[in-house]
Image (cartoon, helix red, strand yellow):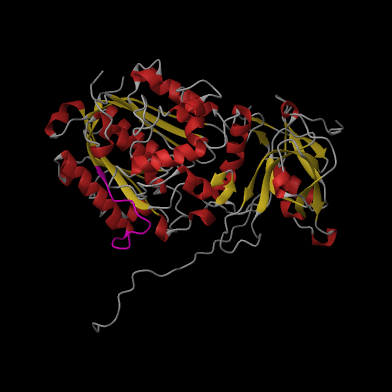
Amino acid sequence: MSEDTAAVTRIETPIYLKYNFTAGSAPARFLARIREGVLTGQRCPRCANVYIPPRGSCPACGVATEEEVVLPDKGTVQSFTVVAIPIPNNPIKPPFVIANLVLDGANLSFIHLMSECENSEVRIGQRVQAVWKPSSEWTHAMDNIRYFKSIDEPDVPIEKIGKLPLSGWEG
Amino acid sequence: MAKLAAVVGIGQTHYKTRRSDVSIAGLVREAAVNALEDAGLGWDDIDAVIIGKAPDMFEGVVMPEIYLTDALGCNGKPMLRVHTAGSVGGSTAIVAASHVQSGMFKRVLTVTFEKQSESNAMWALSTPQPFSVHLNAGAGGYFAPIIREYMRRSGAPYDVGIKVAVKDRLHGARNPLSHLQLPNITPQEVEDSMMLWDPIRFLEACPSSDGACAMVIAAEDLVQQSPKPPAWIRGVAMRSEPTMYAGREEVNPQAGRDCAADVYRQAGITDPRKDLDCAEVYVPFSWYEPMWLENLGFAPEGEGWKLTMSGATSLDEGGDIPWNCSGGVLSSNPIGASGMIRFAEAARQVRGDAGDHQVENAKLALGHAYGGGAQFFSMWVVGANKS
């Protein structure tokens, strides 16, 4: 080896992993329904809490969940962050709001994007509703909801967040 | 009944953005050699090796423990790898301790590491799943809303996180191994640093580091063969809980409270603030200090921030219960090793071997780690005395 050949100390070798996602019965049902624009959760037979997305069991009680509950696409901000960090290859340009949202009739939050709102005005207890992609673009994914937008309803008091009925919150 | 065991050797690497001078194997060996030297022992004195690191996806090396056996002198010896996300450094130390406390082995080498410069933790933590939206916000994106909820319910002033960020970097400036060396950091500088994940600013978040940490744990009858004072293991505990369930207390997790209660009971601690001399606690984002002060029982719920603001956790302000004298995760974060560094630094304190960040006359110290979505907890209490 010639002496002027610089040693290779570092190269980037990306790894691509492609998984076949085996959903299991509860997520499979959830994904089949969200393909049609319907949000479906499951209720725990013991504690009666409603989970969305459902995973087929209640992590708190350790029992299977079977009863399906169709949920509205309205919900409440449980907490949130404004992400300003630029992350390489992220298609979403900062600053953007990620919120822990809990749907009316559900008892566990999930994270989603918030938009059509002033970032500085996002707050815990704020009311939101899903903005869906055009139905022609729907697939078996939570991404069918583009983001959640703020709606003109009074804020939910702290103690009621995550405990609203299916009928929602009218103040 | 567990047999008595002690830490008799500790070895760390320098923590840096990039250790381009060594491979992963070179990195772990450096820490292991330092630990053996500290213990006055050689490779032949080790009965088994316990390794830990964060997810394989980080560096893209699957089951790295297999290829690290040569570097860690464990060909032909029992070797085990532990994995509990960010808490792995702590749980690895506990698994290593258990192998001695059970009487199975006399002397165990335990090593944890991360080479963040060769990895991509942000993406490795963001594998897409169809039933949730893929947002790529990293760990900060997960913890920021929980911190916001803590701020809301405690009514803490906005600058508590800033105070912790300054305090831990001043501690880190006393520790030559610390990644960040910021002896002149000011609250204004932290406040002016970029907001990454509101309310977490750049200087309120941990760095990305390369590094490894190792310890030698020995059975009671072999402890005196090592020249330096031992750190007696007075209690070990691990707890976990599901990441997602209705009504989960995310700000003050049940698993953390249960884990602390267990380790305090073993060590005979009734009032952690009074009974312990110092603590090394996993604080990757500054606001986690007041949150864990409450979770670990150093302050009543909602009042952890008052302890922080009073200077009680600061070495420089002469606080009565200094936290993270080494600089903590906010000063060095080789993820897989970060928990073990907490455990090792607690041991350094009670061995009286913590250099410029020594707490005077420290006799009893807590090491703490958490991981995942704050659902894994591991803790130990080490003491200068056997009981």
Picture quarter containing residue B158?
Answer: top right
Tell me if I can see residue B222 in this picture: no
Name the foreground residue: B262 vs B184. B184
Q: x%, y% of residue B102? A: 29, 27
Residue B58 as seen in the image, left or right of residue B354 = right
Residue B325 as seen in the image, left or right of residue A88 = left
Image quadrant containing the N terminus of chain B = top left
Picture quarter containing residue B352?
Answer: top left
Name the foreground residue: A170 vs A59. A170
Q: x%, y% of residue B98? A: 32, 31
Task: Report the residue at 54% width, 22% height from top.
Answer: B301
Image quadrant containing the C terminus of chain B = top left
Q: x%, y% of residue B187? A: 47, 42
- Would residue B373 be counted in the magenta stretch? no
In the rendered view, tell whether residue B21 sits above or below residue B267: below
Task: Report the residue at 36% width, 27% height from top.
Answer: B319
- Would residue B22 be counted in the magenta stretch? yes
The residues colored magenta run: B11-23
Task: Report the residue at 36% width, 30% height from top.
Answer: B322
Q: x%, y% of residue B175? A: 29, 43
Helix, strand or loop: magenta stretch: loop
In the rendered view, tell whether residue B115 sits above or below residue A101: below
Task: Report the residue at 36% width, 24% height from top.
Answer: B320
Picture quarter containing residue B216?
Answer: top left
